[in-house]
Amino acid sequence: MSKKTILITAASGEGFPSFGRYLKRLGKEFRIVGVSPDKEAAGFTFIDKGYFVSQPEDKNYIRDLLTVCKKEKVKILIPSDPKELVLLAGNKNKFEKIGTLVLSSSLESVRTAEDKEKFFMFCKEKGIPVPDFIKVKNYKDFRKAVFQLGYPEKVVCFKPIISSGTRGFRVLSSKNDRLHNLLKDHPGGVMADFSEVCSILKTAEYFPEILVMEFLPGKEYTVDVLADNGKTQIIIPRTRDKVLLGASFLGRAVEEKEVIEYSKRIVEGLNLDAIVGIQFKKDEKDVPKAIEVNPRIQGATLLSVAAGVDLIDLAIKNALGKSWKKPKIKWGTRMIRYFDEIYQDEKGKFFKI
């Protein structure tokens, strides 16, 4: 019996090497193909075949993926790049015509999920706590919103309405020590000086829609959810105890009842499918508030795999119409992430030491 082929996108991501090692476990039943816009994608060394494709923003991206899927007779396509989700959801029928199943929610669901204001409004309608927020479209309204949410007495944050992870996320605090930030902090931090932010936004030729929000100081969670056409099957919250460059480097699988209930409402209310990631953060009163939903595999989803639940394998089984038994979650399982390297010789061949 020939192996079915799985295609995974964004094979150049920082967390892909560990994901690639995991995918090797599926090698008995599946052949693994990866794609990336990066010709030096280290992830290619962990899978059966890698292809260089255009960026998701490029008009040829879908064409490139279809070409690979046809050539490799791909059965399952697993999206992992936030920039491609709307594109893939809107073109699922093109992949289905060539026999490729895309593990993606519907276009309507993905569009609601990626728009932070729409997502927050949905949560409020469903009784799910979210941070206080104000949408702004210009510099004047931005300043007004920052003060309206309590600055400088309170810490305030902001983020573009369409963005993922920590991209564009900044925190405004009157206690921000600019000298410390300059001389002590690592580059890429989220703390920002209000006057500097204002000087940038005031002179910007284009002002993107921004959500100015209440800052949540408490514990942060990412929730891995397996869903089948809007029905939740497995929900695993995990803490984000140490975050570097937007990625979780230390976390634990935890049975947080409130977070689990809110996640169920979000997935079922938005009719999400396959693997979904939802982020929560607690406020100063220890209330978990929803801050983001990502209808795709998350960077540290393998913590849930380590906790006894192979979400990726189960999502594939769902797509192929196969039955499975609900696994037992090993609550308390921890993840400790570390950096790793791979090398290239003068001919471009990858190797490790």
Image: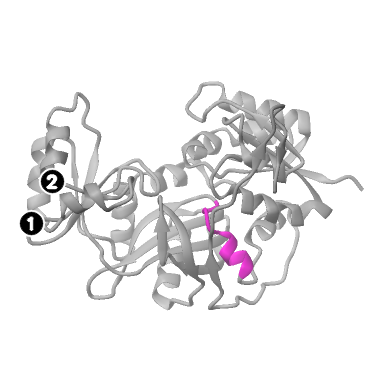
Write the residue at 48% across / 42% down: 82
**Taking 172 as reference, is 61 above or below it?**
above
Q: Position of residue 80 (x, y in %)?
A: 55, 45
x 51%, y 55%: residue:
276
Provide the residue designation for mark 1. 152
Q: Where is residue 201 in the image (x, y as percent from the top left)?
A: 16, 34
Element on which disc 1 rests: loop
Q: Where does residue 63 sit, x and y in percent of width and height? A: 62, 24
Q: Which mark is residue 52?
A: none
Could you say whether the residue bearing mark 2 is in a helix, strand or loop?
helix
Q: Nearer the viewer, residue 76 or 94?
A: 76
Which residue appears at 72% of the width and 57% of the height? 317
Per the image, is 298 magenta? yes
The CA span between labels 1 and 2 is: 10 Å
Q: What residue type is labelled 2?
A: Phe
Residue lying farthest to the right in this orientation = 1
Q: Which of 247 and 89 is in front in this view?
A: 247
Question: In the image, 210: left or right of 335?
Answer: left
Q: What residue type is labelled 1?
A: Pro
Circle 1 packing at 10 Å, graded few (<14), some (14-19), many (20+), is: some
Give left or right: position of 312 versus 253: right
Q: Which residue lies furthest to the top in this view?
A: 59
Mark 2 Cα-neighbour bin, 10 Å: few <14, some 14–19, many ≥20 = some
Q: Which residue is drawn at 22% across and 59% down?
A: 215
Q: How is the image coloured?
A: one colour
Q: What stretch is highlighted in magenta?
A: 297-306
Quick check: 93 above or below 322? above
N-terminal label among 1 and 2 = 1
Q: Is residue 174 magenta?
A: no
CB within 8 Å, label 1 to label 2: yes
Residue 194, label in figure: 2
Asked if residue 35 lies left or right of residue 268, the reply is: right
